[in-house]
Amino acid sequence: MLISKVLICFLWTHSWTRNHACYSPKPQNASSKLVALAMGHMVDSREPRMAALQFFRCYKPLFRIQSRKIFITSSSSSISNKNFHKTSRNIVRLLCSSSTSLGQSTSSKTNAYPEDDKKSKEHQLWLYNTMTKEKELFKPKVDGKVGMYVCGVTAYDLSHIGHARVYVSFDILFRYLRFMGYEVNYVRNFTDVDDKIIARAGELGEDPISLSRRFCEEFHRDMVYLHCLPPTVEPRVSDHMPQIIDMIKTILENGRAYRIEGDVYFSVDEFPEYGRLSGRKLEDNRAGERVAVDSRKKNPADFALWKSAKEGEPFWESPWGPGRPGWHIECSAMSAAYLGYSFDIHGGGMDLIFPHHENEIAQSCAACHKSNISYWIHNGFVTIDSQKMSKSLGNFFTIRQVIELYHPLALRLFLIGTHYRSPINYSDVQLESASDRAYYIYQTLQDCEEAVGQEVEKENIPTEIIDCIKSFNDVFINSMSEDLHSPVVLSAMSDPLKTANDLLHTRKGKKQGTRKQSLAAIEKSIRNVLDILGLMPTSYHEVLQQLREKALKRAKLTEDQVVEKIKERNSARKNKEYERSDGIRKDLATVGIALMDSPEGTTWRPAIPLAMQEQYALES
Ligand SMILES: [Zn+2]
């Protein structure tokens, strides 16, 4: 009842929901499950207001906020406007009635997710499909198998954080599909023939193919740093010229393309469905044409399938003379080569929706009328000061630059701490916060491991520990099933981590007879989830050491210098020079080194630098 009151209070006072808040309570659909999830999330939390705020933030892509009302936008095709209730009273009533129906759940959390519901959810995954603009239940074309194609990088430079976000997002999908038991054929290409590669190679006086090969290797290194699993196959354009040329021939034979001198263009007028994915109309494309229009084209929106060779450029022989493929055709040809014309998932960054993926659909359908891709998945941008991060805008950081100062797993944690479709704002403060969180997670798990030792006995785990683990696992399954809501999982991890720390460090916890079994069980459940999210290090000890080294680098200090400062502070304290000892502590805290006093002495750990702590509080 108290929680309901706090909730009502929150809902009435928070600016998003003040006056009018609408929720779709249509039973037996995704939205009612969402409400159950929201309630579970809040009821489970020790701070319901914060949990509610966090929940709305994490689930932001599912809501549309208009005229100070909240609508669920994309949770299911079965939700329609007519089902929305009109006043804030309804949301309060709904949440309260959910609370009542979950009444017993305040004492037994697991009731929030009935066993049968969980079982059905374990085999379900809802994914937002850019083609239908709706979240759809994932059903592969072949039982138990998934074909997934993700557009890879153009290898001419080091990859930036925008790339990291794409490949971490699809790595999460890849890992989760495998966790669900699917055999996934994951194809991710390399563009190694492209104008940008040729231009860069020209600048450096290097052969374009060798330059792109070099940057393919650099990309592989970045993927290893970021714990992205290798795809099943990584085809390159230069190895697939016969398939590309064959596809262009077929499109020409089918009357959907035309030749001009040594070039071949796709004729968008021959493909009436053009614009279905992006929602663009051909007229819009004409109006928005910014590049100089090639007057030889039948329609300004027509795009090149084959470009005739220019002086000094690499070329391949073709029926239309020497040249090279246009950018878009490679993905149509290579996806067809490895997955066929009909497969399950095609993905990439949101910037590829138009023109790249729109053109791919046109080409593939023009080459084979049976071409069909079930789900088009796109991740959101990385922004800096709300501007898209990109090489062409010059406001980007390479992965290498970032991991020079921050641990790659902290970067990964930062990236999956926001829903993959939402924009993510890159800042040092966010990276500091992710590093701090990573340190807390791994330190807790290492403490568990040390306290447990060789203990393997699984019996006698208290009910509250079993409930805590079950609740965490349920949130994991429910959130990931709902379009891969990894931020909710990360936030729900706080509960088992806190329980572990209570057992490890509080007087009451230390006395518990079943402490070791409980710690072992908690550590295992968190480890399993970290493993699926690609956040599991080789060893806790090693990752903690690396996080400390990065923190020292950011603080521009060595371990010895910190130890020296601790000694200085100890002697100041001994001499009762408290102002001096406090000054040393503060100086270190300013650069992100926190001192911790215990009866055994003073140690240090990385922390968010003092000035950034305030900034973080404002940003979050
Ligand atoms: Zn592509």
Image (cartoon, rainbow, N blue to C red):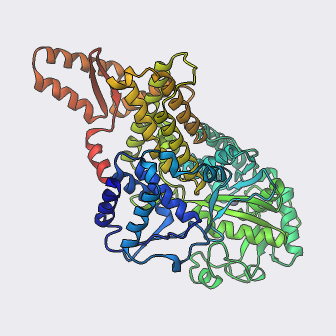
Q: Between 207 and 541, which is closer to the camera in this rendering?
A: 541
Q: Which residue: 34% across, 54% down?
A: 3
Up-down relation of residue 214 to residue 518 (above or below): below
Q: Position of residue 100 (x, y in %)?
A: 43, 58
Q: Which residue: 62% across, 41% down?
A: 228
Up-down relation of residue 60 to residue 369 (above or below): above
Left/right placement of residue 6 relative to residue 316 reads: left
Q: How many tags in the picture?
A: 0
Q: Position of residue 82 (x, y in %)?
A: 52, 80
Left/right placement of residue 79 relative to residue 314 reads: left
Q: Give residue 552's quadrant in the image.
A: top left
Q: Which residue: 41% across, 22% down?
A: 512
Q: Between 197 and 77, which is closer to the camera in this rendering?
A: 77
Left/right placement of residue 294 relative to residue 287 reads: right
Q: Position of residue 139 (x, y in %)?
A: 73, 59
Q: Kindly tell me whether residue 156 is visible in this rendering.
A: no
Quadrant field for ligand 1: bottom right
Q: Between 425 and 573, which is closer to the camera in this rendering?
A: 573
Q: Between 490 and 349, which is closer to the camera in this rendering?
A: 490
Q: Position of residue 497 (x, y in %)?
A: 44, 35
Q: Kindly tell me whether residue 311 is visible in this rendering.
A: yes
Quadrant of the snapshot with the N terminus: bottom left
Left/right placement of residue 463 relative to residue 224 reads: left
Up-down relation of residue 556 to residue 108 (above or below): above
